[in-house]
Amino acid sequence: MLYGRSTELAALEELTARAREGRSGALVLRGEAGIGKTALLDRTAQSASASGMRVLRVTGVEPEADLAFGGLVQLLWPVQDRLDGLPEPQADALRAVLGAGRTPTRDRFLTGLAVLTLLADLAEQGPLLCLVDDAQWLDQATSDALLFAARRLAAEQVAMVFATRDEGFAAPGLTELRPSRLDTGDAVSLLADLGLPPALRDQVIAESAGNPLALIEFGAARRDDPGSFTPVTVADRVLSSYRTQIAALPEKTRLALLFAAAEGRGDLPLQMKAARALGVGLEDLEDAERAGLIQVTESTVVFRHPLIGTAAYQGAVLARRIAAHQALADAADDPDCRARHLPLATTSPDDEVASELVAAAERAADRSAYAAASLLHQQAARLTPDRRAQVRRLTDAAACALNAGHAGQARDLAEQAERSSPGPEDLARLAPVRAAVMFESGERREAARLLLRTHAAGPGLGPAMLRTGATYGWFAGDADSVREAAERLASLGEADPMVEGMAHLVDDDYARGLPLLERAVAGQDGSDAARTRALHSAILLGDDATAMELAAAEVARCRAQGLIGALPQALHLLAERQVLAGAHRDAEASVAEAVEIARDTGLRERVAWLGGVPARIAAIEGDERRCRDLVRDVPDVGRVAGESALSLLELARGDYEAALGRLETAAGPGPQRHMAMAMATVADQVEAAVRLGQSERAERPMRAFEAWARAGRQPWALAVAHRCRALVDGREEDYREAVRLHGQGRRPFERARTALLYGEWLRRARRRSEARDTLRSALEDFEGLRAVPWAERARAELRAAGDATTSAKATAENVLDRLTPQELQVVRLAADGNSSREIAAQLFLSRRTVEHHLYKAYPKLGVGSRRELARLNLV
């Protein structure tokens, strides 16, 4: 009987009922030790099993908190026969986790995707319940994987419940439920069977503070020994009670319990194999089993409550604990299990032990368990007698911490390595980690300078460090760093056309810089690094077609290889290109997916940065409130995108002084101004300045843009350059050339703005018939883009030019606008002939969720099958 738990049980029953109906969900039970979380999980498991749900269960174990994927192995071991049904990269990731494969996992979130797919596949045979107890003691690799899966559950018939103490196991985004303390009436009912006198019962209730475990333990203790307690916290009092019970057991029984607590996983054969070294046998567990402290089966030992194990371990003297861990290490057949015990059995530097820990760290890193790998490298460093080897291991620990997403820890480890007086070569190995942390923390110029200072000391690292230093310098606005990186690469015989091109761009030498970027695009060797450089070079060139193609290819590569952590950045670059092409709904779908993945993977700054893309769309479409809300969260590094969006809003509504002032302030110094500002905002600066009668305020950026456009030879850029010059000089030949060039370009918003401005010029020149034709073209483009304020301007000009048929009308609805961004992605892939499983693998969803989206999309599109879907125009 569970007293006082009707609210909690109702919430858990609702969760499982929804899963049985095909609506997945996850819940976190959070509360202090003894509050009844495990009892709630037990009741939920019992109820779910009775209703036909399959139950998978895992319990976090404190000694295994740093063992890579220890919890996931426990959860998935009974269903490992289902791995062959997963997409190959996902199957390989889980085989590596379960020790059945050696394929390195390149992305730490791929395992979470594999868990999601596996759980969804299991749920195909019926609803599934996953219960995680003591989640605060899960290793981070397991936590990351399970939380990734939990956050992406939708329609898979899967319910997940995590029980955790107040501290640890952060699970943002998941619903939390805190079990309440028992009131007096429920406490009295719970104690009824103990037969305590009323006065003693009331004292136990007061001391227990409504904690069910404390009520049971204190009540039993007072019944057997009515003497007074000296209470502290509830957890400490419960722990003290358990220590008292354990202290009353025979010495060998206490030692057997120490082995069980130190081993942690409940592996009875391993415990007994190790315990024999200290003269302990299976019979020595009997007294503890009779006392109800443990439950023993033919292969497992389980403490009735985790605090009993804590009491057994903490109650042993240090020498006994060391001896137990050494015996467990010697008895272990699994090298990772051995590596878990060795640091706890070693009190002085030991290079042989340190080497074993390094090997274990490398195995953990191969499975993308970077947090565990970092800890193992730290333990190896602590046990390493040689100072230089110690520095190398601390450096590796810092790099793994950075890969695990722990930038603060990576910084601390790097500083610890520096304090160990490393040599020049060690500093060079450390520099990329320190620089990456600095860059992410906003110290971009310092990060670039660090790499340039130390590149020469690291054999084989120099060129890569210089390229990264140039990139950091570019984003930091540090022109000297970009130039210096280019010069040093050339002196090493490693001249990089992208870096060299950037170095010329910071000096406004577009004629020399842009051809080098063209070489970077054309000369890629197929490597991932070269493709990335080619993509960024195409962006700097303004080569929309190539940039779109390369960005789409990068997104496809991330999908195919399961590079989940890299996908938000790739989708961000693709979305920016889609906005330029006028594909606003596609861009919103790309951003929506990127935001969802970034949230699921803890990339919080990326979530904010992504807001610049929909902010630009909102500005074009005239949605001021949404634009301002989105820009508010864009981080400083994305300031150009945010200011560009706001200035476009101000320009559309005729607030020219505000628009121009904003752009002039945002431009600032630095190489990123040359490309990002030139491509995104120079036309806005020119138009605002001309409208104010102060064209001289835009002369300098306009001349730079013209030089860049001539050197790059992109039709859209040349068209915008002619439009800007036409605005300033008023020459019709510039307008006509701009219109002609826009016919070869790919930016419909810029094309429409050129037509609008030329139409205005023609109307003022009293060539009303020509003006109407040009303005109608602008209006058509603006309406297609849903650019409401710009369309209104075009209509006003048309009316002024004598067109009486231009009253505002509702834009014809595009059926695709009825779909959510994810539905749009799913229906397009389905229309291309992809199966639900193939779509799920590409979008990192489950098959059931894909079919759920299709089910919702069909009636919105007026179709009933994939065959009908394929006949629709989904562009």
Image (tube, helix red, strand yellow):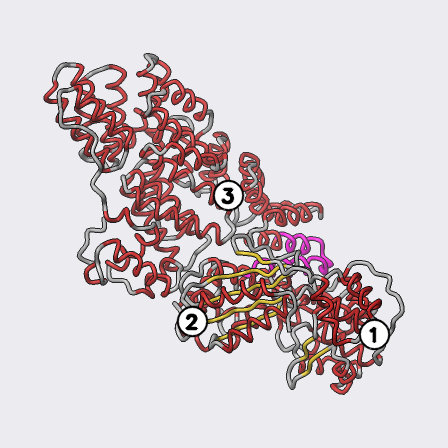
Magenta range is 368-395
Dot 1 amino acid type? Arg
| Residue extending farthest right | 227
* Local SS, label 3: helix
- Could you tell me residue 865's position as x and y percent? 22, 63
Dot 2 amino acid type? Ala
- Return the residue nearer the eye: 725 or 616: 616
In the image, residue 387 lies in the stretch drawn in magenta: yes
Dot 3 amino acid type? Glu
**Tag in front: 1 or 2:** 1
In the image, residue 480 lies in the stretch drawn in magenta: no
Residue at which label 1 appears: 223
**Horizontal side of residue 472 vs 155, given as left or right:** right
**Tag in front: 3 or 1:** 1
**Above or below: residue 862 compared with residue 288:** above
Judge the density around disc 1: few (<14), some (14-19), many (≥20) Cα neighbours within 10 Å: some
Q: Earlier in the sequence, mark 3 or mark 1?
A: 1
Q: Earlier in the sequence, mark 3 or mark 2?
A: 2
Q: Earlier in the sequence, mark 1 or mark 2?
A: 2
- Return the residue nearer the eye: 264 or 420: 264
- Which disc, if any, is residue 605? 3
Name the dominant secondary structure of the magenta segment: helix
